[in-house]
Image (cartoon, grey):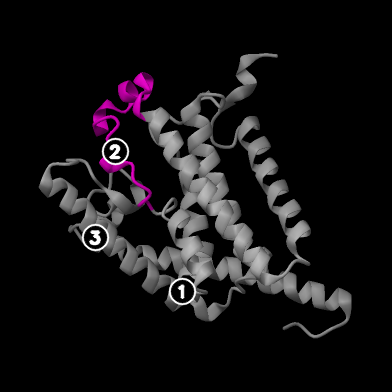
Amino acid sequence: MHADIWIMSPFNGTFWCVVLAFLALLVVATVLLRKRSEETRRRVLIIASIVTMVGFFVYKGFLSVDKEFDRVAAEIGGFNWWGELPLQLCNINMILIPIAVHWNKRALMSFCFFVGVLGAAMAIAMPGLGFDGYSLLLPRMIGFYGTHFAIIVEGLALATLGLYKPKFSDLPLSALALFVIALAACGISLLLRWTGLNANANYFFSVETEGNAILELFHKFLPAPFLYLIPCLLILAAYMLVVMLVITGVEKLKALVSGRKPA
């Protein structure tokens, strides 16, 4: 079998095979659990998130001794544990989903379903240095893509398992949660820089844009750490509107087929 079939890049054949595999996992899990008790569904999702978190740190362990990664990521300082904590926009969901599900916190579930899934999807669509154009069989590639796809599945599972029903009115909840969490991430990044633990700490891209075209544009109008992230709420609003229109359309179609009124 030719080695090229394992090369992972955004939207190539291998990428779509992995997408389909994780979507199939979501469908199978939903079918198997939909008739189980709510407590069982909650417990399964919490355990899945904890397993993902354990996998995240195992993956980071491999990354810490990956000489190739250190070489290609030299411009951002290579590997540093203080810059690899699960505090980015996507992987913070490994922490938030169990909390949100256990204590039934709607604001956090809204954040994980909308913002978390969007953040993880953006990460795999625009992978950083060392994660594009390499074999999927490398430990760092398995860890990076496995973690992010698992986060997407677990975020979507909040809705497919019936633990969270998205609503248009959730926009303020998601926006508030995003603002508070991003502000905390900015504070942690500045603290890590100030203490010298990690001179490049930049959780949530809250201190530097790192060349991101959209954030660079916002930075021109609000040239200050964290503040240039605020216009991102407009992107979130547009994304949530599209998602809700799709969900509403599917619900109306199901109601039409079943002959009942949509909820």
**How far, Cα to Cα, is label 3 from label 2?**
22 Å
Q: Residue 65, position in %: x, y?
A: 35, 24
Identify the residue at the far bottom of this view.
Answer: 261
Q: Which residues are magenta?
A: 64-88
Q: Residue 15, position in %: x, y?
A: 61, 35
**How far, Cα to Cα, is label 1 from label 3?**
21 Å
Whether tag 3 and tag 2 are in contact, CB under 8 A, the answer is no
* Element class at badge 2: helix
Pointer 1: residues within 10 angstroms few (<14), some, or many (20+)? some
* Element class at badge 3: loop
Whichever of callouts 1 and 3 sits on the residue coming sooner in the sequence is: 1
Q: Which residue is mark 3?
A: 226
- In this view of the protein, which residue sits in the foreground, 63 or 257? 63
The amino acid type of the residue labelled 1 equals: Ala
Whether tag 1 and tag 3 are in contact, CB under 8 A, the answer is no
Whichever of callouts 1 and 2 sits on the residue coming sooner in the sequence is: 2
Q: Residue at x 79, y 72 (%)?
A: 253
Residue 8's disc number: none
